[in-house]
Image (tube, rainbow, N blue to C red):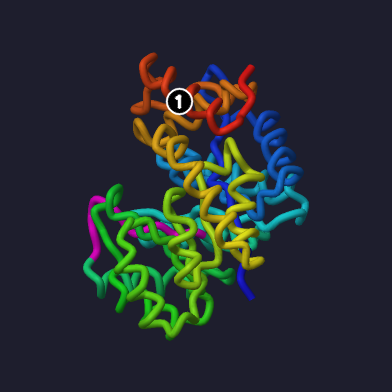
Amino acid sequence: MSIFTGAGVAIVTPFQENGEINYDKLDELIDYHCENGTDSIIICGTTGESATMTEEEHMECVKFAIERTKKRIPVIAGTGSNCTRTAVEMSREAAENGADGLLVVTPYYNKATQQGLIAHYTAVAREAKAPIIMYSVASRTGCNIEPATVAELVKNVDNIVGVKEASGNISQVAKIMAMTDGNIDLYSGNDDQIVPILSLGGKGVISVLSNVAPKETHDICELFFNGEIKASTELQLKAIPLVEQLFCEVNPIPVKKAMKLMGYDCGPLRMPLTELTPEHEKSLAKAMKDFGIALV
């Protein structure tokens, strides 16, 4: 059984002006998603600025999300690291704290070979007793999980159940599905490719768009699952201009500004991320209005 099907939000992490995590605002966001159709919360991923958190902050944030979600929807903890030992420790702790699943990005900077990726993910899975979704996003990490590697890990390691595929390469996605005989929980890591990946047997999306349009992103998936392919495709295509603006600068710079435009002030970004430029803010606001999102 999949950890979730549909649209899981790669949730932003709100910060106070002094840079500390704003847990009151995070609590508000968790309720917002539970009440507006989001199918899962992915905490402390790329969009959550996990790379700027200390390990203590990271795990405290994960624990808070698990406790405050109260089993309303699954919580998946981002626990990847470029250090296998760190990934093991964080994954184990998140599983012990009750995470429904783990999202584990490939090592970055000290990039692993494909054999290194097999060793890395096997080590994490051996120690962390929770379902694991691998995260392949070579545009950020410089490290791609090849289809044969995905297939070997899913077939041979019981609790490695899926992959968040953010390569943007539909041919690679198709090859993954072919090499696993479809026995994998495949999630789109790109909001502009939800329907294409669902058409290949995907289970849903781990989404930046869901931060600002949770119901609509859920509906893209739900309509597809219900056989309403035309309506699902139309909603996917309607979202394309907004998705483009949500990635006009490095994620999560635009989406945090978008949240503020909606009335959810999630505070500053942590450096080295900086505020969205005025030019991009203007085009982002227009795309949000065109999509039907009310601004304050």
What type of secondary structure mainly makes up the magenta span? loop
> Does 139 sit above or below residue 91?
above
Number of labelled discs? 1
Residue 272 occupies quadrant: top left
Above or below — where is 216 with respect to 181? above
Query: How many residues crowd around disc 1 within 10 Å: few (fewer than 14), some, or many (20 or more)?
Result: many
Residue 39 at what x, y percent from top left? 66, 55
Quadrant of the snapshot with the N terminus: bottom right
**Which image quadrant for residue 215?**
top right
Residue 1 placement, left or right of 82: right
Residue 108 in magenta? Answer: yes
- The amino acid beneath tag 1 is Leu
- Name the residue located 33 percent from the left edge and 75 percent from the top edge: 175
Quarter of the rendering containing residue 101: bottom right
Q: Where is residue 237 in the image (x, y as percent from the top left)?
A: 47, 47
Q: Residue at x 61, y 24 (%)?
A: 262
Between residue 234 and residue 73, name the one nearer to us: 234
**How far from the left and from the top, in percent, is residue 291?**
55, 33
Q: Residue at x 59, y 48 (%)?
A: 217
* In front of the other: 160 or 192: 192
Find residue 142 and report its horizontal and vertical position in percent: 24, 53
- Above or below, 109 relative to 49: below
Residue found at the very far top of the displayed protein: 278
Q: Mark 1 points at which residue?
A: 284
> What residue range appears in magenta?
103-112
Q: In this view, does 12 lie above or below 75?
A: above
Q: In which quarter of the image is the C terminus?
A: top right
What's the residue at 60%, 22% (across, down)? 265
| The magenta stretch spans residue 207 | no
